[in-house]
Image (tube, helix red, strand yellow):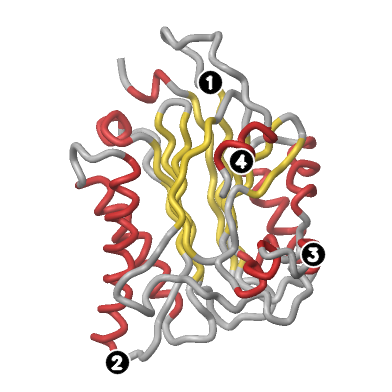
């Protein structure tokens, strides 16, 4: 029996240059859902990255980070998902740093948001200000913390969360890949369950769409391709000034073939009490 027969998951990814930028510095990557051998070994793997527009060659930085992370993750036989995330993100950081040195490109950086589904656990590795949202029972929560100056102000309760999107320093990162030899990503896991929708997106998307709106949009459809297109179109309508990238995952069947159907059902409040910092 193959891994794809044990789990039913639908996914779609989309990236768009947007209305303002001259080039697309975002990148998305989705594992091959038909690659049973890789899925059996490491689970399902997805990611988005946002090259830093203020620095040179942001598109190269984002694609390099995702390519290196995926290669490292798939080759790290025997390691736990958490260990793979640590090594993969460090290798991605070094690859971007070295690429900037080879190209003489100066400072070159990118965000990185990667997720790995193994059974009922979603492992998340994150640095920068791309975001992961979990939509469950028509409610949505952001799972990640923004590694920005404004994000720090919110966590210190010096700034209200509803001021993030309009703050003049919203995009000033204090953590990303490629600028230093070592990085400190956030790595954690959350439990997922049937009919959950997970949305990965760059700040060009979430900067013009409120957290609660992601849940409102999924009420109309939870099909990943439709969701991706609707969310990108909404961000365009609201005149986002950045590139737009999104990956949507919908978990259709995580409870088949001998899985314990009495497994605890987690609310979003449960997840945030136990798994957020």
Q: How far apart in space, not on screen, are marks 3 and 4 (Cα)?
A: 31 Å
Per the image, the residue denoted by label 3 is 160
Residue drawn 38% across the image and 44% down it: 31
193 relative to 148, above or below:
above
Residue drawn 30% across the image and 62% down it: 90
Image-based side of 12 in relation to 109, left or right = right
Mark nearer the N terminus (2 vs 3): 2
133 relative to 166, above or below:
above
Rendered location of residue 248, percent (x, y): 58, 44
Q: How far apart in space, not on screen, are marks 4 and 2 (Cα)?
A: 39 Å
Q: How far apart in space, not on screen, are marks 1 and 3 (Cα)?
A: 38 Å
Per the image, the residue denoted by label 4 is 224
273 relative to 235, above or below:
above
Mark nearer the N terminus (1 vs 3): 3
Task: Label 4, secondary structure: give it.
Answer: helix
Mark nearer the N terminus (3 vs 4): 3
Residue 203, quarter of picture: bottom right
Rendered location of residue 250, percent (x, y): 58, 34
Per the image, the residue denoted by label 1 is 253
Per the image, the residue denoted by label 2 is 104
Mark 4 Cα shell of 10 Å, populated few (<14), some (14-19), many (≥20): many
Rendered location of residue 221, percent (x, y): 73, 36
Q: How far apart in space, not on screen, are marks 4 and 1 (Cα)?
A: 15 Å
Residue 154: assigned label: none
Mark nearer the N terminus (4 vs 1): 4
Q: How far apart in space, not on screen, are marks 2 and 3 (Cα)?
A: 40 Å
Judged by depth in the image, the label closer to the viewer, 4 or 2, is: 2
Q: How far apart in space, not on screen, are marks 1 and 2 (Cα)?
A: 48 Å
Judged by depth in the image, the label closer to the viewer, 1 or 3, is: 3
């Amino acid at each position: 029996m193959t891994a794809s027969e044990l789990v039913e998951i639908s996914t779609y990814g989309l990236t768009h240059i947007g209305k303002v930028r001259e080039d697309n510095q975002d990148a998305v990557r989705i594992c091959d859902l038909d690659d049973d051998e890789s899925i059996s070994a490491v689970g399902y793997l997805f990611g988005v990255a946002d090259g830093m527009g203020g620095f040179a060659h942001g598109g190269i930085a984002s694609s390099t980070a995702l390519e290196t992370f995926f290669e490292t993750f798939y080759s790290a036989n025997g390691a736990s998902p958490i260990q793979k995330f640590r090594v993969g993100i460090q290798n991605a950081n070094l690859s971007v740093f070295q690429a900037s040195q080879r190209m003489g490109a100066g400072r070159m950086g990118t965000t990185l948001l990667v997720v790995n589904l193994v059974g009922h656990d979603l492992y998340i590795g994150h640095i920068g200000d791309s975001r992961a949202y979990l939509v469950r029972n028509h409610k949505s929560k952001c799972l990640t913390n923004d590694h920005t100056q404004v994000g720090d102000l919110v966590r210190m309760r010096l700034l209200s969360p509803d001021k993030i999107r309009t703050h003049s320093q919203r995009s000033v990162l204090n953590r990303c890949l490629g600028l230093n030899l070592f990085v400190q990503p956030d790595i954690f896991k959350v439990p997922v369950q049937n009919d959950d929708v997970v949305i990965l997106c760059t700040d060009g998307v979430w900067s013009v769409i409120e957290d609660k709106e992601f849940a409102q949009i999924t009420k109309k459809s939870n099909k990943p391709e439709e969701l991706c297109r609707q969310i990108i179109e909404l961000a365009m309508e609201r005149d986002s000034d950045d590139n737009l990238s999104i990956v949507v995952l919908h978990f259709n069947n995580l409870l088949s073939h001998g899985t314990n159907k009495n497994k605890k059902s987690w609310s979003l409040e449960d997840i945030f009490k136990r798994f957020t910092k």
